[in-house]
Amino acid sequence: MANVSFKNIKKVYDEDVVAVEEFSLEIEDKEFLVLVGPSGCGKTTALRCLAGLEEITSGEVRIGDTVVNDVPPKDRDIAMVFQSYALYPHMTVFDNMAFGLKLRKVPKEDIKRRVEEAAEILGIEKLLKRRPRELSGGQRQRVAVGRAIVREPKVFLFDEPLSNLDAKLRVQTRAEISKLHQRLQTTFIYVTHDQVEAMTMASRIAVMNKGILQQLDTPQKLYDFPANQFVAGFIGSPSMNFFPAKLRKEDSRLYVAAEAFTVEIPENRLKAYLPHAGKDIIFGIRPEDIHNPLYVPSGIHTAPVEAKVDVIELMGNEIFLYLISGNNQYVARVDPRTRFTVDEKVQMAFNMDNFHIFDATSNPENPEAIR
């Protein structure tokens, strides 16, 4: 078991391509930490630096109390599960799982015990005599995970291991990986671009973009209190809606004045935003906080906003409405009893107890949240 530490890691390719920039992160022993972000954000590079598959340009990587910058990958006591299963096609499942142990000259009895125990954990004990071509995608992925388990490492590294599975199998397998973490009680570091995977599996999430760590927190806190517009837009599905606006003060009241609507900020949230009156802002609201007025939850402050229905997606347990207000296009997740039609002009209810405001003057590329 081990904690993992990244300290001011920088990785540069060809002198001018910066993949990871001043990356610092402390991962606790037995934690399930997910690195998430869009393609090219540096998450896999950070993982490969930890595994020793990439040489860091500067900084320090620790596993436990040991600095591993110059330690060969085979001696770092980690096991990695890749996006591609990387199974030997001519070997049986047993031999694929045992191969690394045989290279280390582990006794045969110990190899047999470890492989059988891992197979039982993963529910593949009846597949040990098969070859990869005789397995489904999900079964191959379990074999790849099993190959990591038998090494009994201090740290497990997962690099987008579910990307090659279909949607239903991804849901099933991510639940199995979560249960595996609870059972093994080992440090898991998991890389994905899928924020749903991150939200459902992680004890903490590190959000990355352009090689820089944007925010580190629990899934719920990332969702409720994003540090900036990038995190707010990346976490949540469908993603948060954003509207350029200005904070306008009239007497003791404060309003968000967007191009196509004006909504009042409730009194209980004035304190945080009054010092920013007159500023250009980005107003953010999640699709689930835009309601059909007929089905507004009780006890919330709402503000009416006129809109035109552009597209309707019936999801069964909910409806996604693609709406237009002025020049702004946005999404609402509404009650399935809603009976709107395309091109209909409707009045939506914005939940003004649950919105976000970002300071458009703080960082033009990625405005910071105002709290």
Image: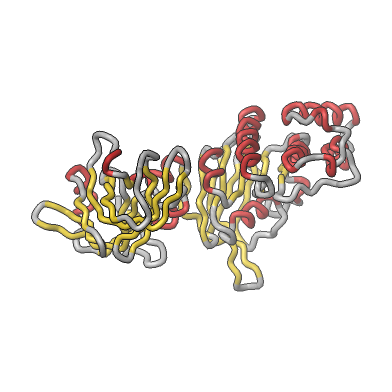
- Across and down, in percent, residue 25 comes to 53, 49
295 sits to left or right of 209: left
Q: Quadrant of the N terminus?
A: top right
- Image label count: 0
301 sits to left or right of 151: left
State whether residue 304 is above or below residue 93.
below
Query: Residue shown at 68%/45% (left/top)?
Result: 165
- Across and down, in percent, residue 215 comes to 46, 51
Answer with the quarter of the image where residue 45 lies: bottom right
Answer with the quarter of the image where residue 248 lies: bottom left
Is there any visible trace of residue 276 in the rendered image? no
Query: Residue shown at 59%/61% (left/top)?
Result: 40
Is there any visible trace of residue 346 in the rendered image? yes
- Across and down, in percent, residue 80 comes to 71, 45
Query: Residue shown at 74%/43% (left/top)?
Result: 137
**Who is closer to the viewer here, 320 or 73?**
320
345 sits to left or right of 33: left
Answer with the quarter of the image where residue 325 lies: bottom left
**Who is closer to the viewer here, 228 or 232?**
232
